[in-house]
Image (cartoon, helix red, strand yellow):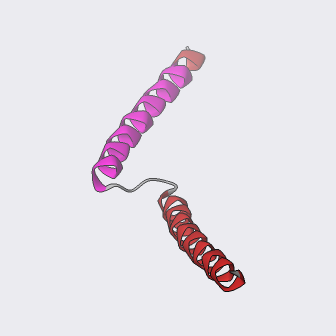
Amino acid sequence: MVKMFIFLASALMLASACSDDEQGSSERKLSGDHVWKEQTETIDKAKEVEGLLQDVAEKQRQAIEAQAQ
């Protein structure tokens, strides 16, 4: 009897915890927030910097080639 009560109480707590998390995750999806938001923003910024560096490197190569001719 006690084991059954403990099992039911645990199951109810687990079910309520899951339903609260689902509501929170749907709110986060609507607002665009997620666990790795800061990391993904950092990666996006790094990709932008990488593109800029590639552009500068290409212009530098072209300038060197133009001087060599």
Question: Does 22 sit above or below residue 45?
Answer: above
Quadrant of the snapshot with the N terminus: top right
Q: Residue at x 32, y 43 (%)?
A: 26
| Whole-percent x, y for residue 25 in the image | 37, 44
Q: Main secondary structure of the magenta part?
A: helix
| Whole-percent x, y for residue 39 in the image | 55, 61
What is the quadrant of residue 49 in the picture?
bottom right
| Whole-percent x, y for residue 65 in the image | 67, 77
Q: Is residue 30 left or right of residue 20?
A: left
Total residue callouts = 0
| Whole-percent x, y for residue 11 in the image | 48, 24
Quadrant of the snapshot with the C terminus: bottom right
Q: Residue at x 66, y 75 (%)?
A: 61
Looking at this view, name the residue that lies furthest to the right.
68
| Depth check, front residue: 43 or 58 | 58
Q: Residue at x 57, y 19 (%)?
A: 2
Q: Residue at x 34, y 55 (%)?
A: 32
Question: Does 32 sit above or below residue 4?
Answer: below
| Depth check, front residue: 54 or 5 | 54
Residue stretch rendered in magenta on the structure: 5-31
**Magenta region includes residue 28:** yes
Looking at this view, name the residue that lies furthest to the front.
69
Question: Does 8 sit above or below residue 66?
Answer: above
| Depth check, front residue: 3 or 37 | 37
What is the quadrant of residue 21 in the picture?
top left
**Magenta region includes residue 51:** no
Looking at this view, name the residue that lies furthest to the bottom.
67
